Each structure stands twice: as structure tokens, then as C-alpha cells.
């Protein structure tokens, strides 16, 4: 969370995990990243039960629906967005998203979880799991390239949309000897963003030096939007685990990661 984050609606909060819906970035006709991150959600008083095999220790179910908050003026569709947030026994954070079309006509949307990770030093961070993936480089007019390295490291501003990525991405903080493991299902794409020094200074709600301690890895549905007919539902899920090792391929127990992901 940025130390300069503004908690004044309708300004988006700089940090955490903003929900970008029904539009990611400026890839559409409405406001950047949509309206979901700027609207109040309600708590579901009668959520569906957890699966019998789940070991999650805490959950909360949130709902966003078409309201009088101005959504119908810019996106005139009736919808229901349910978000289940879970916390596992070892601090695993789970997000399960369900979008249902409650309208009589179809609608199309893109979606992203704009996740901000806190790191010790961005120059000591590497991201694994994106090798050989194609990406759109937003710093080069969205030209398409293919990731050539076995890991992504940072020496300047990065703003890329990786396409059709693997289900597991690892953010390795060598200085802290910590790895964040991001597992996803239903989110084919992943955005990697760090503003570096010049752009950080131009952001009013971002500290001048906070780029050194921040990396954004956003699971998303971006390149190929989802279209739902009346009554249809889309579902996606993300789980974030922390592994206290500076090597993703080292002391990571894949069976524990897979079993905890399957229990979402």
C-alpha cells in the first residue's frame, strides 16, 4: 500500500488488490480499470458453504451489483459480481470471482486483480514462469514480443501484458529470501508493472521512492474478453502463497501448493 494512497472516493486506492471490472486499463469505452474498484461492495449474508475439503480459516463473501452509483449511465447492464476472499492456515490468500449476467441481453467484459506486492528492492527481484510467453509492451505502443529470458528482472520501467501465461507465477525477493507464488485459474493473462523513478514522481498518490519496494503482478482476462449471455456465469480464482526461500525451484513443496490451490 502506498504511503500516499488516497482514501477519497471515487479515487482508486493505490495498493492492495483493486478489482478492475468490467474493463481492464483503457481497453474499452468506459473509465480506466472500470468502476468496481471505486464502488462500495456489500457483504453476502448467506454465502454458499465452503467445500468439505477446504482448510481455509477465514472467509468473507462480497457482492457488487448494478446500483444507483452511476454504473448504469456508463455500462447499462444488470450483473452480479461475487468475490470470496479466503485466508488459509499458513496465510494463503484466496480470491474466487464469479460474474453472472442477470440482464436479458449479453454483455462483454475484461477483468483483472491489480495486485501490489511489497518487495525489499526491485533490483533484487525476479519473476519466473513467464518464459517463452508472448507479451504486449505498453511502453512500445502495445507491440507484441516473446519473453526470451528464463526470468524477468528489473532495470527500468516495465508495463507489459503477458498473454496465455502458465497457471503458476513466482515473484522471488532475493534480499528477503521470500517467494510469492501466484496460482490462477480462469485468468489467462498477467500484467507486470513497475513505474520506476521518473513515472513514480509523476504519480501524486505514489511515493517518489516507492517503486523500489513495489512490484505489480495482475492476473487478468485481457486479450480475449469474456461474453456472457443472459443467465450465464464466469468463474475465476487466484491463490497467493508465501514461501520462505529465495529460490522458487528449491524448497517449494509442489504438492502442498497444488493441494491448497485445489481446496479453493
Image (cartoon, grey):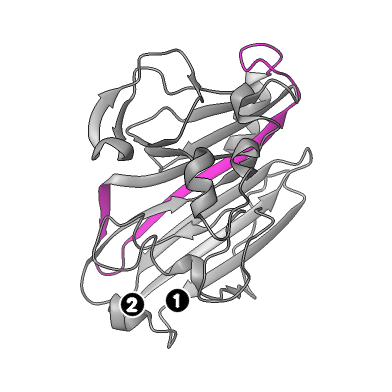
Quarter of the image where the C terminus is located? top right
Residue range (magenta) = 224-252
Nearest to N terminus: mark 1 or mark 2: 1
Alpha-carbon span between mark 1 and mark 2: 7 Å
The reply, left or right, for residue 88 in relation to residue 186 is: right
Q: What is the crowding at mark 2: few (fewer than 14 residues within 10 Å), some, or many (at least 20)?
A: some
Residue nearest the observer in this picture, 96 or 28: 28
Examine the structure image and report whether residue 225 is included in the region drawn in magenta.
yes
Q: Quadrant of residue 7?
A: bottom right
Q: Position of residue 153 (x, y in %)?
A: 51, 22
Q: What's the residue at 27%, 35% (across, down)? A: 140
Q: Position of residue 135 (x, y in %)?
A: 31, 31
Q: Position of residue 210 (x, y in %)?
A: 63, 44
Mark 1 and 2 residues: CB-CB less than 8 Å, in contact? yes
Q: What is the crowding at mark 1: few (fewer than 14 residues within 10 Å), some, or many (at least 20)?
A: many
The residue identified by callout 1 is 65
Callout count: 2
Residue nearest the observer in this picture, 222 or 226: 222
The reply, left or right, for residue 18 in relation to residue 73 is: right
The answer to whether any part of residue 104 appears in the image is yes
The residue identified by callout 2 is 78
Q: Is residue 67 above or below residue 252?
A: below
Q: What's the residue at 45%, 39% (across, down)? A: 185
Q: Secondary structure at mark 2?
A: loop
Residue nearest the observer in this picture, 201 or 89: 201
The reply, left or right, for residue 25 in relation to residue 156 is: left
Amino acid at each position: 500500500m502506498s504511503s500516499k494512497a488516497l482514501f477519497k472516493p471515487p479515487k482508486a486506492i493505490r495498493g492492495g488488490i483493486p478489482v478492475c471490472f468490467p474493463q481492464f486499463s483503457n481497453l474499452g469505452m468506459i473509465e480506466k480499470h472500470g468502476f468496481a474498484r471505486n464502488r462500495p461492495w456489500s457483504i453476502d449474508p448467506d454465502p454458499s458453504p465452503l467445500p468439505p475439503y477446504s482448510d481455509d480459516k477465514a472467509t468473507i463473501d462480497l457482492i457488487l451489483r448494478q446500483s444507483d452509483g452511476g454504473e448504469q449511465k456508463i455500462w447499462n447492464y444488470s450483473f452480479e459480481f461475487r468475490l470470496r476472499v479466503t485466508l488459509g492456515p499458513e496465510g494463503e490468500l484466496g480470491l474466487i470471482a464469479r460474474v453472472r449476467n442477470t440482464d436479458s441481453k449479453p454483455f462483454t467484459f475484461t477483468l483483472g486483480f491489480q495486485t501490489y506486492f511489497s518487495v525489499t528492492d526491485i533490483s533484487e527481484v525476479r519473476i519466473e514462469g513467464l518464459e517463452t510467453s508472448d507479451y504486449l509492451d505498453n511502453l512500445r505502443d502495445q507491440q507484441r514480443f516473446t519473453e526470451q529470458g528464463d526470468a524477468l528482472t528489473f532495470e527500468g520501467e516495465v508495463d507489459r501484458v503477458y498473454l496465455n501465461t502458465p497457471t503458476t507465477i513466482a515473484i522471488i525477493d532475493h534480499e528477503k529470501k521470500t517467494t510469492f507464488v501466484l496460482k490462477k485459474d480462469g485468468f489467462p493473462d498477467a500484467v507486470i508493472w513497475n513505474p520506476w523513478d521518473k513515472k513514480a514522481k509523476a504519480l501524486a498518490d505514489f511515493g517518489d521512492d516507492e517503486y523500489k519496494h513495489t512490484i505489480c503482478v495482475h492476473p487478468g482476462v485481457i486479450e480475449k474478453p469474456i461474453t456472457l449471455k443472459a443467465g450465464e456465469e464466469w468463474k475465476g480464482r487466484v491463490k497467493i502463497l508465501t514461501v520462505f526461500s529465495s529460490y522458487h525451484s528449491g524448497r517449494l513443496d509442489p504438492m502442498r501448493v497444488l493441494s491448497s490451490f485445489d481446496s479453493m
